[in-house]
Image (cartoon, rainbow, N blue to C red):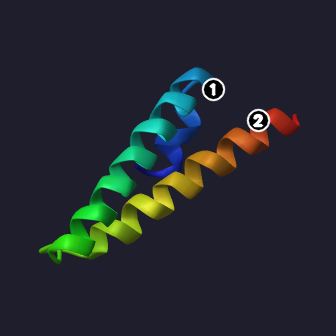
Amino acid sequence: MKQSEIKQLSTAELQEKLGEFKKNYADLKMAHAITPLENPMQLRVVRKTVARIATEITARSAQ
């Protein structure tokens, strides 16, 4: 998810997406621990998306 897409979402939608991506990251991490993923770069992409969403939520709450 790109930063421009994140900025267009409402705060409630961001909270929902954050939960979804955190769960997705935890699932990928568990799956990778058991059997290596075909594309381990998925972990990095999802982790960075979580960080982008969390940063946007923090920035909005600071305003």
- Which residue: 76% across, 35% down? 60
| Residue occupying the far front of the picture | 34
Q: Quadrant of residue 27?
A: bottom left
Q: Please give left or right for residue 19 compared with residue 37 in the image.
A: right
Q: Quadrant of residue 35?
A: bottom left
Callout 2 secondary element:
helix
Q: Earlier in the sequence, mark 1 or mark 2?
A: 1
Q: Please give left or right for residue 56 compared with residue 58 in the image.
A: left
Q: Is residue 14 above or below residue 51?
A: above
Give the camera-side residue of 31 and 47.
31
Q: Please give left or right for residue 40 compared with residue 57 in the image.
A: left
- Which residue: 46% across, 62% down? 47
Give the camera-side residue of 31 and 43.
31
Where does residue 28 sit, x and y in percent of width and height? Answer: 28, 60
Badge 1 density bin: few <14, some 14–19, many ≥20, Cα 10 Å: some
Work out how far the residue at label 1 is from the one at label 2, CA to CA, in angstroms: 8 Å
Where does residue 40 sit, x and y in percent of width and height? Answer: 25, 76
Residue 11 numbered mark, or none: 1
Determine whether label 1 and label 2 are within 8 Å by CB: yes
Give the camera-side residue of 46 and 26.
26
Residue 60 numbered mark, or none: 2
- Which residue: 38% across, 55% down? 26
Give the camera-side residue of 61 and 23.
23
Callout 1 secondary element:
helix
The amino acid pointed to by label 2 is: Arg
Where does residue 52 sit, x and y in percent of width and height? Answer: 57, 54
- In this rendering, the count of numbered labels is 2
Badge 2 density bin: few <14, some 14–19, many ≥20, Cα 10 Å: few
Q: Quadrant of residue 63?
A: top right
Where does residue 1 sit, x and y in percent of width and height? Answer: 40, 49
